[in-house]
Image: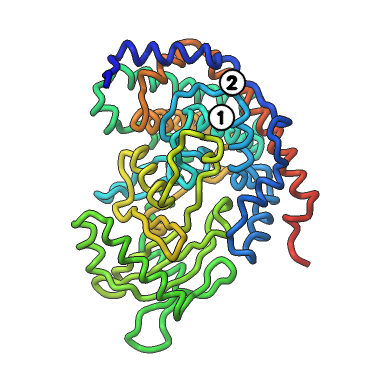
Amino acid sequence: MHWANPEERRHLGLTRRKQVGRQEHCDLKPKARGTPALSLLEHASKGRVPALIKLKYQLMAQSPFGYFRGAVPVMAADLAVLPNTGIVTQICGDAHVRNLGAFAAPDGRLVFDINDFDETIRAPFEWDLKRMAASLVLAGRASSHKEASARAAVERCIEVYAAQMRAFAGMPTIEVARFQVHRMNSVQPIQAALLKAERATPCHTLEQLTVPSSKAGEPSRFRDQKPMLARISGRQAAQVLAALSPYSAMLEPQRQHLLSLYRPVDVAFKVVGTGSVGLRDYCIYFEGNGPNDPLFLQIKEETTSGYAPYLPDAKPANQNGQRVAEGQQAMQVQSDPFLGWTHIGSRDFLVRQLNDHKGSIDLEDLSGKTLVAFAEVCGELLARGHARSGDPLTIAGYLGAGDGFAQALAKFGSLYADQTEKDWEELKASGKGRPAS
């Protein structure tokens, strides 16, 4: 097997410009999608909890950005009909401004990184950038920015991505794998997310999600807040608890030992996010050294990535929870120490901590100059994730030193934001997102 040297890898990226020029990434062909957006959403809802599908549409109908969050299958279809570079890396798959956030690293420090990987898969690197570009324009519109300002934020995101990728291309491989982004504490929206994460302790989650038992000496129980949170018991709870056995078996020995010091106390069904609404999501409340030592694990159903149908070379995932966990570990420098996977019957699940020092940004945090500053961090974090899981020399070879790619992505972001607003209006007109009378 031939080992490609650095110059060959750079040249490979350069030759991919013949496949699709950097300036050609501004193109959008919504009529080539083939299947209407509503039909794509309906297909993606098959197998979900029927009673919650209406809630998902209601959340998507609240705003264009809300629609965008739940419409990965639509954007995957739109990207698939466009020419791509064929330069493959691990993509987040749902790269948008609210899918970056703060969380606790294994050593307890708070870090800020991409934190949602439900759609992760190996695919052309630019698909992440195009989704981020559209999200920045939509976020800019939602936070009262002029269109030129939102597009400027996209350009800065992509310029920083390209500059960082060129830097990675010249670094030792091991240094790329452990590269830390240090300037994030100076960006106001990130400061806000870190502050939220600092407060989101397991004890705070205990206070938010549980109620004290009416029997003296017994632990707290999940509170019922239907449809968002509902205690489960009997056979259903037993099935969820049984899923801990295969989960524990895949953990590293030191994590197995840590988990063994906690005993499960209660189980609940929880509604999370927008795109995930309708999938089965369970929470287990554990106690360690008494009531002041809670641990909450989330067991979250994972289905096939929305991009998989358009990637003929994609390996079929025999465990989508594993796909998500391994994709996350590939892109993040540090991941949740309890990250893993399991199954309940024929359904695949991701396992992770629930709300352990987690904090995300709000669109209101992106007003004024903060949008551009946050966009720069988005570009840097995506570059790091792609460089860790792909080849920075090939990507850098494709991007080169010009600004044509950034300008093309800014135009694409505006065009896709316009298309998202049209699809959102269509959803509202269909009545699917109308609240029940």
Tell me what residue is drawn at x 37 percent, y 53 percent: 198
| Quarter that holds the N terminus | top left
**Residue at horizontal 29 percent and vertical 17 percent from the top:** 4
- State the image coordinates of residue 360 (x, y, percent, origin top left): 47, 47
316 or 197, which lies in front?
316
Whole-Å distance between the Cαs marked 1 and 2? Answer: 9 Å
Residue drawn at the location 47% of the way across and 47% of the way down: 118
The residue that disc 2 covers is 25
In the picture shown, does residue 38 fall above or below 373? below
Colouring scheme, one of rainbow, by chain, secondary structure, one colour: rainbow
Foreground residue, 356 or 19? 19
Residue for point 47% across, 58% down: 301
> Which quadrant holds the C terminus?
bottom right
Task: Tell me the quarter of the picture where residue 23 sits.
Answer: top right
Above/below status of 121 relative to 31: below
Task: Tell me residue 362's x, y (percent).
Answer: 54, 46
Res 411 → quadrant: top right
Dot 2: element: helix
Marks 1/2 in contact by CB < 8 Å: the verdict is yes
Three-letter code, disc 1? Lys
Q: Which residue is mark 1?
A: 130
Quadrant position of residue 91:
top left
